[in-house]
Amino acid sequence: KEGVVWCKMKPEYGDYIEDIDLVIIGGYYGEGARSREGVSTFLCAVVEYTVDGETIYHSLAKVGTGYNMAELTELREKLKPAIVPSRGDAPPAFIAHWKPSKKDDKPDVYYDPTASVVLQIKCAELVQSTSFSAGWTCRFPRVSRIRYDKRPNEIMKLGDIVNLGRQ
């Protein structure tokens, strides 16, 4: 109609994708007030258990919204024991087949997934991506809940994400 301006809106999180549980494997300092105290954006992963009995973590998404300052401060504190010393440019061995495609994709800090924290993530959809080793990523991710009650071995498996993404 004449006089009506149409614009494309970001999809709502409503009923698009069920909440997915991911483990934090990396962190980014970023910029702004939330970053002055430390990491404010997190690299999250799914797990894969190989037939050889190996446990591999696949990067899936970066998330930096959905929590307030008090929750972020507590999360940073809980993650301190999980910090893994940097090995130069190479990511730790527990991150499967992943090499950051851009310089700003490399986390400033890595976390041991077996000692890390689980985040419940809500997203608009899963899309295929070569930027993450899972082969998928979350579109418009946000933290819906920090799951201190869940262990890292209770997160989503790579096969679950692939099936969910193909739906």
Image (spheres, rainbow, N blue to C red):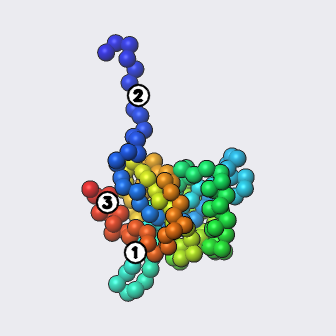
In this view, the residue farthest toward the left is 167
- The amino acid on which the numbered mark 2 sits, given as a three-letter code, is Cys
Q: CA distance from mark 1 to mark 3?
A: 15 Å
Estimate the x, y position of residue 113 in percent, counting from the top left: 54, 73
Q: Which residue is mark 1?
A: 48
Q: Which residue is mark 2?
A: 7
Which mark is drawn over residue 164? 3
- The amino acid on which the numbered mark 3 sits, given as a three-letter code, is Leu
- The amino acid on which the numbered mark 1 sits, given as a three-letter code, is Glu
Residue 40 visible to the viewer:
yes
Quadrant of the rendered image containing residue 105 = bottom right
Neighbour tally class for label 1: few under 14, some 14-19, many 20 plus, Cα within 10 Å: some
Q: CA distance from mark 1 to mark 2?
A: 40 Å
Q: The residue tagged with tag 3: helix, strand or loop?
A: helix
Q: Residue at x 47, y 64 (%)?
A: 22
Circle nearer the N terminus (1, 2) = 2
Location of the N terminus (image quadrant): top left
Circle nearer the N terminus (1, 3) = 1
Q: Residue at x 34, y 84 (%)?
A: 51
